[in-house]
Image (cartoon, helix red, strand yellow):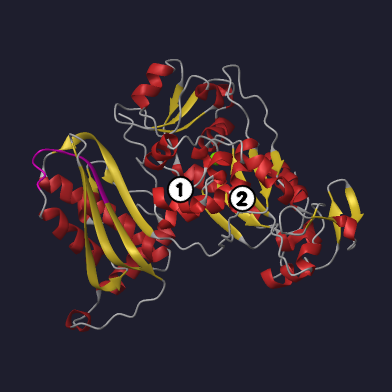
Amino acid sequence: MPATTIAAKASPRAMAEGSRVGAMEGPGGSESSSFTPSCYSAPGERKVCVHPWCTMGTEMGEPRQTILHADLDAFYVSVELRRRPELKGKPVVVGGSGERGVVAAASYEARAYGVYSAMSSVVARRRCPQAVFLNGDHALYAEASKGLHEIFARYTPIIEPIALDEAFLDVTGSAKLHGNGPTIAHRIRREVRCELDLGCSVGVAPTKFIAKLASEAAKPIASTSGPLPGRGVVVVQDHDVLAFLHPHPVKAVWGVGPATLKRLTALGISTVGELAAVPVDALVASLGDSLGHHLHELSNGRDARNVESTSKMKSIGHEETFSADIYDRPELDSQLVRMTDAVGSRLRKHGSAAKTVQIKLRYGDFTTLTRSVTLAQPTDLTHEILAAAQMLLAREEVSTGIRLLGVSVTGLSAEHHRQLSLDDLSGASWQEATSAVDAIRERFGSEAIAPGSALTVDGVSIKRKGAQQWGPSQ
Ligand SMILES: [Mg+2]
């Protein structure tokens, strides 16, 4: 089914300016709103319009944001069910099916048996022995994600991706072109269903925090006989924010982890409303300056964070849990070469250079350590990242057995200016060799060329993004 709207080509500024026009289309059709005193309510000190389609707040110099949080329902499982429709209605788990696997996603039928993501696959099997386990297929999910983000981009250029299946959208400036927040939310849901055959829940609110809670409130509900349909779209208007927020359990607030939850529980605080009622000084005294103020603001419905469309990638890495612990150093070295090859390749594709190289080791007894080194200058060359990673690995004891190995780069920058070294002047440089490898892969696929140590009896073994990320299947 074709898309029902035309992609927005306007610049963010032009779209924001569009929001200053007072006539907007409401959910029920075309509705004109002009500035009249009856148009306003005054909850607290802020004057805001009670009509969701009215943007007169902007006219008054009080920007009223409309933020959407869109999140696909049981994403990995739903994508798998498109090609395995015979599994619809059954408990399905995507993740590592082996002894060491973890659950990446569970269908609503499996959730009804207490199976959740990040749980060990062994526990999941115990809770729901009849569940069908599927190994994750990152490439397939990435493709679905691309389609999803293309739908988002029809409505606003201000999109903050949170995960493959989740994003914040600032649609404040999109009203003139596409309708108000609820209208856009319903359109996105419809297009995701029609074009991608996936379910999507959307929260509409004046802040990111409330939009995220609203999308959760819109989700289907797990039951052993299949998901009970959720509301799909939940809209929280300015004047409803506190009534919506305050009954939530306090752990719903961003920044409340297990340690903070324990402290708040000890203080007798169990709901967001109770947290909001605590004087800020008392919170600061108990939780520290930064967390105290943060929780006070959020629990009172204030969240100044904007939707950041230029969300910068902070790190690029690859890690893998092995099907059996590795005791052999040459074998680990060879794994490191392959992982670093994948990391370097992604780094260059992203057009970045990295300043810091880190390795991660997990031993058989689950002891985990990370070691990092900062380079003299940022690099995007695989052999330089590898040299640093090898140096870090060489310092660590591996004879007790390694369960997981990872390599990652951080301190990413978009531009880097290499200083020429003597090596660069002596014939063909590493940079040229690396560019040649990238060009060959671009044209013939990632398995067309690889480091010598990636050769196995079965051919070239290349690390793919997301491969083995939930543990081995054996
Ligand atoms: Mg999701």
> Is residue 428 at all visible to an observer of this figure?
yes
Residue 232 placement (x, y as % from top left): 69, 37
241, above or below 21, in the image? above
Label 1 vs 2, first from the N-terminus = 1
Which quadrant holds the N terminus? top right
Dot 1 alpha-carbon crowd within 10 angstroms: few under 14, some 14 to 19, many 20 or more? few
Q: CA separation, marks 1 and 2?
A: 14 Å
Q: Amino acid at mark 1?
A: Gly
Q: Amino acid at mark 2?
A: Gly
Residue depicted at x 50% and y 52%: 280
Dot 2 alpha-carbon crowd within 10 angstroms: few under 14, some 14 to 19, many 20 or more? many
Q: Ligand 1 appears in which quadrant? A: top right
| Residue 70's disc number | none
Judge from the rendering whether residue 98 lies leftward or rightward of residue 89; answer left or right: left
Residue 76 belongs to the span the image colors magenta: no
Mark 1 highlights which residue?
255
219, above or below 316, in the image? above
Name the foreground residue: 23 vs 464.
23
Disc 1 is placed on an element classified as loop
> Is residue 462 at all visible to an observer of this figure?
no
Of the residues tagged 1 and 2, which is closer to the observer?
2
Name the foreground residue: 334 vs 125.
125
Residue 222 placement (x, y as % from top left): 58, 24
The quarter holding residue 399 reads top left
Ligand 1 within 8 A of label 1's CB?
Answer: no
Residue 128 placement (x, y as % from top left): 44, 17
Mark 2 highlights which residue?
301
Q: Which residues are magenta?
A: 397-406
The quarter holding residue 7 reads bottom right
